[in-house]
Amino acid sequence: MIANWYPNMKRLSLVLLVLLLMLASGEDKDPAVQYWTCGYRGLCRRFCYAQEYIVGHHGCPRRYRCCAVRS
């Protein structure tokens, strides 16, 4: 009985892993987030460019930070 149960659990864990990876990769490619504004003339980005600095995380979705251009 246990011999038949174990392969099914391995298959279920593989399916769950694939679903989680698909959800994680789809979250990153949201084009609308690129144009979210925050702070004073800031944009929400995953990583700030070299000419930008981090203002904070307020007003941005999870894992994004508010980046503003240095003057």
Image (cartoon, grey):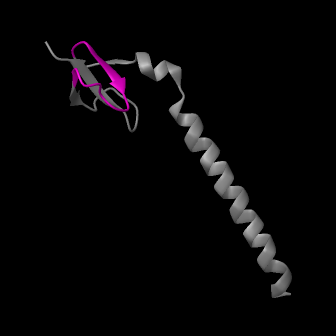
For the record, the magenta segment spans: 40-52
SS majority, magenta:
loop
* 15 over 69 or under it: above or below: below
- State the residue lying farthest toward the front: 50
Residue appearing at x 73%, y 70% in the figure? 10
Q: Quadrant of the C terminus?
A: top left
Image spot of residue 57 (x, y percent): 28, 32
In depth, the one of 59 and 12 nearer the eye is 12
Magenta residue check for 51: yes
Quarter of the image holding residue 23?
top right
Residue 35: give x, y in percent of width and height: 42, 15
Say whether residue 24 is left or right of residue 11.
left
Total marks shown come to: 0
Q: Quadrant of the N terminus?
A: bottom right
- Image position, residue 59 (x, y; %): 32, 26
Q: Is residue 63 above or below residue 37?
A: below
Q: Residue at x 81, y 79 (%)?
A: 5
- The stretch drawn in magenta includes residue 36: no
Q: Residue at x 35, y 24 (%)?
A: 44
Question: Going 38% across and 32% down the picture, which residue do you hit?
Answer: 46
Q: Position of residue 48 (x, y in %)?
A: 29, 28
Residue 70 position by quadrant: top left
